[in-house]
């Protein structure tokens, strides 16, 4: 199945509109989640409780007409609770082990409050997120495409939580911060959630549509100097890089992995198509840079102690490198 | 839409933009060229002024040329300097806000691989060709649509940056200041230039003189070498001289060396020989067939070598007794005439005459040969002395010219500056004041009586002495029209009271009748006194006691005293 650029734009706009029927405001969040899905990646939503993270993902699941599973991560959650396990079952009078698939065997997995599970359980997602497969009892089970993990976490409550390991974080395409809504949006939220009618999203796109859109996005051309800029940007996130700005050299312990560069380009391609263009621009790169890099920059002790935010560092990076893009006549 | 058509349209659009880009760059580089040219002109001007080698007109020409050429070259370079298409595309993306459309289109048309898919997800890379082609076409079309809305003319309107404006303004102000306040330096440069030219001209003159000396057949090779070498050494030193003072010193030294080659008695001998020749001619007028007719003719004309040859060729044995007697008389007459000026020659002629009278032909012939040889030697000495004198005279004139050049430069340099000297300054065409530029105003400045009389200072003496007269010409001659104290030989003027004699009420008047002394009662010959003083002034000049600018004046003064 193939899809045209116009259909791509139309479908994406319809999805956003449908989610907007339920979710008030948070357009940037919705846009980033959508870009991530169309780019073929997983999303980590971070925000304080009550901002509609779970609702957003559930609504998105409804609009996409995909199989949806939700796992509430808790400290006593075990890996098998996610991936599935071998159970002893009767089969024609014989008792044998049979694989019981876990909730991960879905298209859209909501890993709610993912940082409440132990690292052991969190790591159960690693293979699924990267390889789109699950290995249980020496047997590998491929997950149905498309497969996305949309996780949420609460940045405030530290007690009883387990920060995600770097390998896990790196597998998320985007990390999207969910801000507190402004008063105008809050009024609308109150109106919708305290009345008799609850919004319900209708299916807009199927799994096949999503795959086709993802394939189309990958065909968007990108000029070589834009690719080179992405590479320079990624390298500059490392403190030992000559192009790294002072903020990076001072407060960053480790920079982005190549997955960050991939996320930048794929996210920019989707953004270009959504903007009605057929090529990637520097603005597209800059638009997705915070979401693609903020969870991939590891601050050092000084950075954490100074209260430096990775978004500040990314902004400094972009500002520094953008200056070098100027072409003199 | 056909891909080829899209490609054609894009390339057409790209070329159009490129023309505007080159125009824009031409203007931008022109501005930079202007700044560069102004800076270069200012730098060279300052260096030229520091070295005092830049004239005002050269300064203006330099500024104009540097500015014009640098801007022209920069503009041309800006138009024609090669630039890659990729660079151009990025420039257009940036300035037309095309969001990398043109650079992407260009790369797609250049058949470059522009996707990073292989790098990102090689395991799932499965390009759908139709999809890709469709996207490429849409991308090109999108670029053309957005590009058609662009106004490339906007590129041409280039704004100067603040720093460029400041730089251009500063440079222009700097150049104007140099032009206005550099006037004294321009004048000095002009003076230096004229001095150099004058020195070069004098060097050329001396070279020509040396050549002339080398070609003078009247001189022996040794004499030629001696005089020419002196001149050539002077030329060499002159070429190394930088200032008027140095060059005049060189010429003065050369003149002294040449004067040393002069024979003081040569002139006397020459006159004696010529007088003898004239007297012989009177006795043997032209047309008379006497043995010494040709000899007398050559002697009277100053051709001593020819006369010597005539004497040597005289074959006494071929003469009749009557001719021998006549020859003896003539030789005796010549001997008497030459007795004072050339005793040796006179003696030999007398011996020859006596031998002829004694009938000793052989001895007479031998005496004539010796006389011829002596005459030849005398002739060569006279020729050398005359050549050295002539060369010294020319060298002396060269000094005058150099000093004159310095003086005229000084006057030019003084234009616009208030005069410091009171009274007259020597401004005649032949004046000797070379340092008027320094405000000395020449020596002997009076009390302003001749102020404003350009070129005509008061004359020393009522009767000017004729210029360029030669020694022996006699008479009076004028010398430089210089300022001289009014009382020196001039008309009467204000009386000056000199200190008294010691007697109360006595006064010695500075002007009035003096006791002239008895005529012709001098016990020391004038020539001797003059020679003594001439030697003294030469020594004073050589030892540097006399200022360079005054040397010619002193020299001319003593020359005017020569009888």
Image (cartoon, coloured by chain):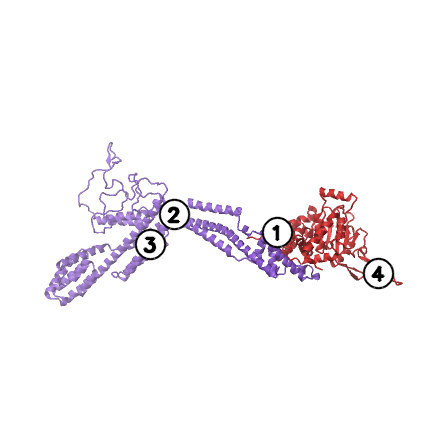
Chain colours: A red, B purple
Residue name at image x 19 percent, y 55 percent: B271
**Are circles 2 and 1 on residues that touch, CB within 8 Å?**
no
How crowded pointer 3 is (Cα within 10 Å; few <14, some 14-19, many 20+) is rated as: some
Q: Which SS class for mark 1? A: helix
**Are circles 3 and 4 on residues that touch, CB within 8 Å?**
no
Residue with the mark numbered 1:
A322
> Which chain's residue wears label 3?
B
Q: Position of residue A181 (x, y in %)?
A: 72, 44
Q: Nearer the viewer, mark 2 or mark 1?
A: 1
Residue with the mark numbered 4:
A98
Residue with the mark numbered 3:
B201
How crowded pointer 1 is (Cα within 10 Å; few <14, some 14-19, many 20+) is rated as: some
Task: In the displayed orientation, state which residue is furthest to the bottom.
Answer: B318
How crowded pointer 4 is (Cα within 10 Å; few <14, some 14-19, many 20+) is rated as: few
The earlier-in-sequence mark between 4 and 1 is 4
Residue with the mark numbered 2:
B188
């Amino acid at each position: 199945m193939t899809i045209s650029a116009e259909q791509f734009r139309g479908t994406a706009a319809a999805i956003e509109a449908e989610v907007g029927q339920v979710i008030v405001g948070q357009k940037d969040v919705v846009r980033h989640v959508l870009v991530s899905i169309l780019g073929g990646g997983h999303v980590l939503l971070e925000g304080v409780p009550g901002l509609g993270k779970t609702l957003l993902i559930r609504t998105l699941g409804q609009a996409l007409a995909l199989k949806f599973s939700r796992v509430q991560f808790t400290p006593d959650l075990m890996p098998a609770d996610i991936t599935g396990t071998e159970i002893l079952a009767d089969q024609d009078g014989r008792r044998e082990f049979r694989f019981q698939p876990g909730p991960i065997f879905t298209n859209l997995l909501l890993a709610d409050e993912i940082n409440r599970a132990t690292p052991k359980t969190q790591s159960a997602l690693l293979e699924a997120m990267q390889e789109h497969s699950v290995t249980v009892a020496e047997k590998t089970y491929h997950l149905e495409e498309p497969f996305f993990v949309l996780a949420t976490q609460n940045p405030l409550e530290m007690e009883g939580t387990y920060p995600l390991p770097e390998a896990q974080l790196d597998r998320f395409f985007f990390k999207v911060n969910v801000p507190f809504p402004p008063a105008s949006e809050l009024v609308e939220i109150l109106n919708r959630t305290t009345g008799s009618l609850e919004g319900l999203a209708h299916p807009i796109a199927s799994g096949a549509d999503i795959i086709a859109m993802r394939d189309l996005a990958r065909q968007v051309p990108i000029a070589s100097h834009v690719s080179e800029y992405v590479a320079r940007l990624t390298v500059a996130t490392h403190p030992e890089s000559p192009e790294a700005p002072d903020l990076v050299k001072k407060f960053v312990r480790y920079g982005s992995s190549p997955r960050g560069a991939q996320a930048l380009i794929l996210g920019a391609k989707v953004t270009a198509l959504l903007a009605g263009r057929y090529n990637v621009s520097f603005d597209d790169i800059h638009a997705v840079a915070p979401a693609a890099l903020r969870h991939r920059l590891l601050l050092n002790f000084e950075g954490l102690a100074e209260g430096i935010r990775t978004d500040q560092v990314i902004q400094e990076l972009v500002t520094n490198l953008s200056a070098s893009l100027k072409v003199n006549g | 839409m056909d891909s080829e058509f899209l490609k054609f349209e894009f390339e057409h659009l790209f070329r159009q933009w490129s023309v505007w880009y080159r125009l824009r760059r031409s203007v931008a580089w022109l501005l930079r060229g202007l700044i560069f040219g102004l800076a270069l002109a200012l730098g060279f001007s300052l260096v030229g002024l520091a070295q005092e080698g830049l004239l005002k007109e050269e300064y203006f020409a330099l500024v104009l040329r540097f500015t014009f050429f640098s801007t022209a070259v920069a503009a041309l370079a800006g138009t024609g300097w090669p630039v890659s298409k990729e660079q151009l595309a990025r420039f257009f993306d940036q300035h037309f806000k095309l969001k990398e459309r043109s650079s992407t289109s260009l790369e797609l048309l250049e058949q470059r691989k522009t996707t990073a898919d292989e790098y990102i997800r090689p395991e799932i890379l499965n390009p759908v060709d139709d999809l890709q082609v469709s996207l490429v076409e849409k991308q090109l079309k999108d670029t053309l649509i957005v590009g058609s809305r662009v106004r490339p003319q906007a590129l041409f309107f280039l704004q100067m940056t603040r720093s460029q404006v400041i730089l251009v303004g500063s440079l222009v102000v700097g150049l104007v200041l140099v032009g206005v306040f550099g006037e004294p330096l321009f004048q000095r440069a002009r003076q230096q230039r004229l001095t150099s030219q004058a020195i070069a001209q004098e060097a050329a003159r001396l070279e020509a003189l040396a050549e002339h000396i080398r070609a003078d057949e009247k001189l022996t090779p040794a004499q030629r070498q001696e005089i020419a070498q002196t001149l050539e050494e002077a030329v060499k030193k002159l070429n190394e001289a930088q200032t008027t003072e140095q060059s005049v010193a060189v010429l003065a030294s050369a003149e002294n060396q040449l004067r040393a080659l002069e024979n003081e008695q040569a002139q006397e001998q020459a006159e004696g020989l010529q007088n003898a020749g004239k007297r012989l001619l009177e006795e043997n007028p032209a047309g008379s067939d006497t043995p010494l007719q040709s000899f007398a003719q050559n002697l009277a004309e100053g051709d001593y070598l020819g006369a010597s040859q005539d004497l040597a060729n005289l074959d006494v044995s071929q003469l009749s007794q009557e001719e021998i007697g006549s020859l003896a008389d003539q030789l005796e007459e010549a001997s008497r005439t030459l007795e004072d000026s050339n005793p040796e020659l006179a003696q030999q002629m007398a011996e020859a005459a006596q031998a002829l009278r004694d009938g000793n032909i052989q001895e007479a012939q031998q005496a004539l040969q010796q006389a011829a040889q002596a005459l030849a030697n005398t002739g060569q000495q006279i020729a050398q002395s005359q050549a050295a004198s002539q060369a010294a005279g020319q060298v002396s004139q060269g000094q005058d010219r150099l000093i004159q050049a310095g003086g005229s430069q000084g006057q030019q340099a003084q234009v616009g500056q208030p005069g410091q000297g009171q009274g007259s300054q020597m401004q005649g065409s032949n004046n000797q004041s070379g340092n008027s530029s320094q405000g000395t105003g020449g020596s002997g400045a009076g009390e302003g009586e001749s102020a404003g009389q350009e070129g005509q200072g008061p004359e020393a003496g009522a009767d000017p002495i004729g210029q360029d007269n030669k020694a022996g010409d006699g008479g009076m001659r004028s010398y430089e029209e210089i300022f001289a104290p009014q009382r020196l030989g001039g008309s009467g003027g204000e009386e000056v009271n000199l200190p008294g004699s010691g007697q109360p009420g006595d006064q010695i008047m500075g002007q009035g009748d003096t006791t002239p002394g008895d005529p012709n009662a001098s016990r020391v010959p004038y020539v001797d006194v003059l020679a003594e003083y001439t030697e003294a002034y030469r020594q004073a000049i050589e030892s540097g006691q006399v200022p360079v600018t005054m040397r010619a004046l002193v020299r001319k003064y003593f020359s005017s005293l020569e009888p």
